[in-house]
Amino acid sequence: MSFNPFAPLFEVPTRLNLPIENHKEFAIISTTGIIGFLAHSIFLLLFWYFDVDFMAYLNIGSILIFAAIYYINRHSVGKSSLLIIIASLEIIVHAIFAVFILGWTSNFHLYLFVPILAAFLVGKVNGISSYILNLFSISVYVFLAVYMNYNNPLRSISEAGMFTFEIMNVINVSSTIIIVTMYYNYVTNEAVKNLAKLNDELKEQSQNVMNFNSELAQQTEELQIQSEQLTHSNKHTIDSIRYALRIQEAVLPSVSELNTIFGEKNVMIFYNPKDIVSGDFYWAKEKDNNKIIVVADCTGHGVPGAMLTMIGESLLNNIVLEKGITEPALILDSLQVYFSTLFEGSIHNIQDGMDISISNINKEAKKLYFAGARNSLTYIQNGKMETIKGDKMSIGHSKIKSKSIDKFTSHQIDISVPTMIYMYTDGYQDQFGGRINRKFYSKNLRALFFDIHQMPMSKQRTRLKMTFVEWCDFAKQTDDVTIVGIKID
């Protein structure tokens, strides 16, 4: 058997007599302590190197905090909630000072999502504490976004330094989320295996001292207990995911925002996740008379896909709002550069990314500019329907290296006449159903667009929803579905 020198750092000390069901909390807090200690040690060196003295001194305190968290976790029982709260508050305070000093583009604001993940995984910070902690993280995120939009950072460093922090923070937050989640799953599986082993031993002992009737009664009781535990665990997981849904919905554009950008009764959204949270997302902003709408389909669906949507939305805010890039093809090029380096330092073969379409509506120029990564745009003018297909390459995936990235194609449409456009992911057209259980297909979806394009937007959405429900019938939904329709007068 091979020896792992790092294993003792994560193993539960026998002196704690910690129940198996608490091993996952112990593992997550130990991992948090070690990652926090190492990450802040690296930040300490970087801040000293780039002469950001205040942040360097702050990181010394952060290192001591995470060292104390790791030590307390290994020498006491029942303090997991307190330790998670302390770690979360440290991360939030660190992010606040870093954004004030270096600015929004340093990407330190991304760390504000880490406390939400920690509270979800550990599951011990519940009730009012969880709501307050998560609400505080979101409030700080919104405050910093608004404040830094009108104020300059307190400290300026070199472009190389700022780029180092931008890329490092995106990679660090993404890697932390993936590592902690994977290790949480590993420890949970090990705990389930150990629990199953203990149950087998109990059953064997019962068979030696009880008759058939008492054995049957004992097994029935054990199965009932396990069923109740599973029900409780499942309920907690579903409740946590539903709370994550509220977070995801909070960052999607509201109806009032879309009406402000594109005009009241000129926009329609059919958004139908496969699971509670979605791997699809849509994004809309107005920048210098450019009305930009994005529809994206991230790898997978459910919680993994939802995590990528948060990264995608943050990168779009940075590229469009902070850097001022509004040309769709250039936005895709920038996203490709970010995603090609996102998991570059990971030891795992991670194949994550997104299919995405981007439109820029400029009414002054009477032009619509479009670019897509595997996603298409369908538009109708003067009773004629056309479809512009996106380039046959996705955003991201670790096999794509930044030195060999192809540029995305820019398309242009004259919108001097009334135009109806539709942007969509592949979930609707790939849905199985109908009498012979086949896909809906893109041809039928475009025909449906043509049939409804003259209807009011609310009726268009109703027709899309009714058609989808009737097509699915009793079939299970296979993917997240997102369709955005915009009427340009």
Image (cartoon, grey):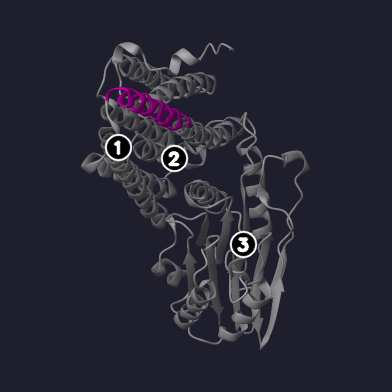
Q: Report the span colored magenta.
A: 186-209
Quarter of the image for the N terminus: give it.
top right
The residue indicated by pointer 1 is 216
Q: Main secondary structure of the magenta part?
A: helix
Label ID, residue 109: 2
Tell me if residue 153 can be seen: no
The residue indicated by pointer 3 is 358
Position in image of residue 330 (x %, y %): 67, 54
Q: Which of marks 2 and 1 precedes in the sequence?
A: 2
SS state under label 2:
helix
Residue name at image x 53 percent, y 33 percent? 175
Position in image of residue 63 (x %, y %): 40, 18
Which amino acid does the dot numbered 1 rest on? Leu
Residue 489 located within the stretch drawn in magenta: no
Seen from the viewer's position, the closer of residues 278 and 258 is 278
- Left or right: 79, with 169 as reference point: left
Residue name at image x 48 percent, y 85 percent? 456
- Left or right: 116, with 447 as reference point: left
